[in-house]
Image: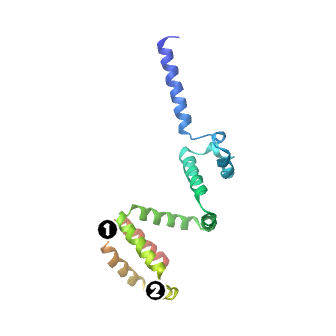
Amino acid sequence: MNKAVSVKLFVLLFLSTSIAMAEGPDWSELDSAQQKLLKPFAGQWDQLSEDKKTNILKGAKKWQTLSSGEKKITQQRFKEWQGYSKSRKEEIRSGFNAFQSMPSATRQQLRQNFEKFNKLSPDVKQKLKKQWKSMSQSQKQKSIQKKLRNKRLTQKQRRIIQNRIKRKK
């Protein structure tokens, strides 16, 4: 074989290997524990994108580290998620993305506020919820805007938060 043909064959071999690796592992390349856990995906595994396979494998790896109690909670949440409408799922994803795009200090403050709220007695929580529900839309808006002025949020994040409040009425 001449040198040009050898180089072309090497390049083709390299490219085909790279393409195969980019497609993620074949079903047969998964170990038996992974195949057992991912059995619902067996029929469609070869049609999934690399990103989808990667995300599924990450989820499977995380699942294996959960305690039985955590698995039970996760299954309940997934069942609840499946019952949501498409618009409700989009609303949740939008809120999650807005939260993720906030500065870490703001996220930390929100987490702390959430934890404080959860530590309140059920009576106090109920009273605060009732107070919130009794407020008019403009009162809610003013209250939120006052709190948001002190936070470093983008306009988009503020709009998402305000839209969520409008929907909850």
Instruction: Specify the label residue 128 is tagged with.
Output: 2
Residue 9 location (% of width, % of height): 52, 20
Height in image: 81 above or below 17? below
Mark 2 element type: helix
Side of 86 relative to 7 (left or right) = right
Height in image: 97 above or below 12? below
Side of 102 relative to 84 (left or right) = left
Q: Circles 2 and 1: CB distance less than 8 Å?
A: no
Residue 4 location (% of width, % of height): 47, 15
Where is mark 1, residue-wise?
152
Exactly how many numbered labels are in the figure?
A: 2
Q: Residue 70's quadrant in the figure?
A: bottom right
Instruction: Specify the label residue 109 is tagged with.
Output: none
Q: Which amino acid type is marked by label 1?
A: Arg
Residue 154 location (% of width, % of height): 34, 65
Q: Residue 166's quadrant in the figure?
A: bottom left
